[in-house]
Image: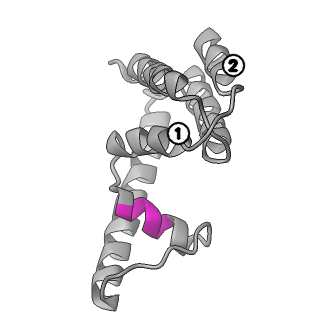
């Protein structure tokens, strides 16, 4: 929990154009590609991104996104139901998620960018350790 608070403090010094680099690092470690995240945001009306691909390719990727998203949700329910995901794990994940909202709407000093990504990795590594 102390690391989450330090993470919040690290975000309190805004600068220019670095939040996207942090988001990109998170996407690289997720189940989704950057394009899939863009599609999910567009389908949830959180972005107005235009795609330079055929309609067929777009809808094929929409299907892939939905399948991955559904599998992620089933996994979350399963791990929570089996007690693998504990309340303190969920609390850490929720707090990190809230900070991602802060990151996407602000900027982080370049020298803090690596520190922020490192804190995220450390917290998630500890949370996901079996």
Q: Which mark is residue 115?
A: none
Say above or below: 73 vs 8: below
Q: Residues within 10 Å of mark 1 (few under 14, many from 20)?
A: many
Tell me which colouring the rendered structure shows. one colour
Instruction: Judge whether 24 appears above or below 64 on screen.
Output: above
Dominant SS in magenta: helix
- Magenta-drawn stretch contains 51: no
Q: Secondary structure at mark 1?
A: loop
Q: Which residues are magenta?
A: 35-40
Q: Residue at x 34, y 90 (%)?
A: 55
Local secondary structure at mark 2: helix
Q: What x and y, as percent, mark residue 34?
A: 37, 57
Q: Please give the label number shown on residue 18.
A: 1
Q: Residue 7: where, in percent of width, then height?
A: 61, 20
Q: In the image, what residue occupies the spot 67% across and 47% down?
A: 105
User: Could you say where residue 54 lies in the image, as x and y percent from the top left?
Assistant: 30, 88
Which residue of the protein is positioned furthest toward the bottom in this rendering? 55
Q: Is residue 38 magenta?
A: yes
Q: Which residue is mark 2?
A: 9
Relative vertical location of residue 116 with respect to residue 42 in this rendering, above or below:
above
- Percent across and percent down for residue 15 are 64, 35
Q: CA distance from mark 1 to mark 2?
A: 16 Å
Residue found 40% across the figure and 50% down from its top: 72
In the picture, which quadrant includes the C terminus?
Answer: top left
Q: Relative to residue 104, is residue 37 drawn left or right?
A: left
Q: Quadrant of residue 97?
A: top right
């Amino acid at each position: 929990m102390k690391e989450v608070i330090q993470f919040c403090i690290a975000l309190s010094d805004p600068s220019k154009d670095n939040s996207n680099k942090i988001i990109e690092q998170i996407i690289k470690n997720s189940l989704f590609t950057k394009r899939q995240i863009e599609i999910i945001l567009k389908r949830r009306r959180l972005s107005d991104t235009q795609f330079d691909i055929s309609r067929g390719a777009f809808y094929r990727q929409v299907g892939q996104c939905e399948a991955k998203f559904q599998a992620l949700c089933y996994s979350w329910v399963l791990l929570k139901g089996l007690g693998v995901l504990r309340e303190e794990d969920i609390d850490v994940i929720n707090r990190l998620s809230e900070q991602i909202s802060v990151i996407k709407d602000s900027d982080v000093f370049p020298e803090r960018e690596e520190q922020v990504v490192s804190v995220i990795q450390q917290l998630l590594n500890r949370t996901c350790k079996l």
